[in-house]
Image (cartoon, rainbow, N blue to C red):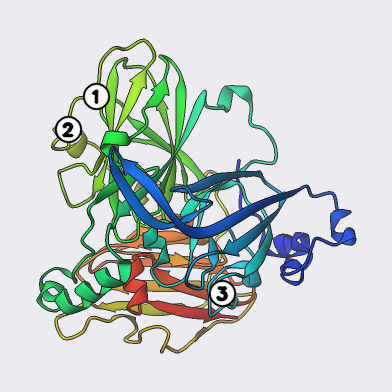
Amino acid sequence: MGNPVGRREFLHRSLGAAALAAAPLPFWARQIGAPVREFSLTAAVSDVSVGPGIRWRTWTYNGVLPGRERRVREGERVRVILRNELPDPTSIHWHGVPVINAMDGVAGLTQQPVMPGESFVYEFIAAPAGTYFYHAHVGLQLDRGLYGALIVEPAEEPLLSASPDREYVLLLDDWLNIEPEAALARMRQGGGMGGMMGGGAEPPYAGYLVNGKLTAAAAPLAVAWGQRIKLRIINASSATTHRVGLAGHQLVVTHADGQPVRPVTVDTLVVGMGERYDVVVTADNPGVWPLLVGTVDSAVPGVVVPFAYAGSNDRVRPVSVWPPALLRGRTLRYADLAPERAAPPLRPLAALDLVLGGGMMWSTAWTINGQAYPRADVLPITAGRPVRLSIFNATMVRHPMHLHGQFFRVMNVSGTPLPGITKDTVLVDPMGRVDLDFEADNPGKWLLHCHHLYHVEMGMARVIAY
């Protein structure tokens, strides 16, 4: 289920989608037999409700927060018409999907930004199957609410015995009720001593959201005894690494960043910005239980979502701190994960050494090898050869590093060899190192960056070109 598609096969199937981006799908392309799924996304200023009596005037897709879930079948041709009714230019990135370069949605790198009043057509093959999301990729627009889930279902239906009885998508977000640019200005002013002591200031978030709602408005997850419940957990936050746990139950992790892993049972997950995990919960403990989401460095949950069994008259009780059973339980580590199917090693000839730096008292810039994007050299690599990125975090904060355009294999985390799980985003701990291998078989200029939105805005990004 959800095995990554080889890049050469992917490019062959795409039939030059870059050339189709600005025009209706031509007759010859419709004859290959791939079904076409077309959506429209209108980016505009809207008023949304995040809780009882709490309205937020922000930027949305089609007037809702989060943007509507888009669910397609693996192998389908996806065509998305973006209409920009915002006051600023925008674009959309298909996070985790290995699209061709022209469809990647990085304004100023893979496309020109879509200007106010204009439209742009994205077109790509939905492959491989997995849990992804889409979001704006201009400046700080993600922190205004421009995101939504993108689910690519397998081309072949799984056996009934392997299918969950019910599925929920959980989009995690940090809620900023001021202008992101004002938050960035505060961070630049306060990044001095805060940077020396703790790695830099953070945005002044007013709360945390699950599917666009605070705790008081969180919709219950309705379940019945004996059901197998699949949760697709997507951290769409701009600057928050979340912990996730469900009281009274364990989580069986089946996918990381949409790609299948050997099932592993844990009590909690740590989910970096841009990361996704699919988990299965067996509903075998009736009642109403709190599903907890909160910043990883706090014992106070940010959002509590009721996990409610049919027929239960209970209500979830207020939760002021995380239950000790969850905090002392097993937390998922990368070392716990193994790919569902082993693949031959890539054997790169050499490593590209990258050092994450910045955030100290003498600078508010965040850098890779001492350079801040966009005033940074392109990192050239050779097409068709395996590449190893060896990333060392020389700062005192975590950095979720995301590579556009391809999956990588996580081979080593701070000295612990790993069996090469397939991901596109990986958390690098303070003073930690990760080794990532990938096949350079999707040509273009690709962004490698920290998915902490304010870190990338202050320079923690580089372009890899081949």
Can you see residue 270? Answer: no
For the residue pair 220 and 426, the one nearer the viewer reads as 220
The residue drawn where x is 79% and y is 62% is 24
Of badges 2 and 3, the one in the foreground is 3
The residue drawn where x is 32% and y is 12% is 312
Of badges 3 and 1, the one in the foreground is 3
Q: Which of disc 3 and disc 2 is earlier in sequence?
A: 3
Left or right of residue 161: residue 183: left
For disc 2, the marked residue is: 319
Look at the numbered discs 3 and 1 and tell me whether their residues touch, using CB distance below 8 Å.
no
Can you see residue 378? Answer: yes
The picture places residue 381, in percent across and down from the top left corner, at 55, 82
The residue drawn where x is 18% and y is 31% is 325
Going by the numbered disc 3, the residue's amino acid type is: Met
Secondary element at image label 3: loop
For disc 1, the marked residue is: 316
Secondary element at image label 2: loop
Look at the numbered discs 1 and 2 and tell me whether their residues touch, using CB distance below 8 Å.
yes
The Cα atoms of the two marked residues, 3 and 1, are separated by: 46 Å
The picture places residue 166, in percent across and down from the top left corner, at 50, 26
- Number of other residues with Cα within 10 Å of mark 1, as a class: few under 14, some 14 to 19, many 20 or more: some
For disc 3, the marked residue is: 115
The picture places residue 439, in percent across and down from the top left corner, at 58, 68
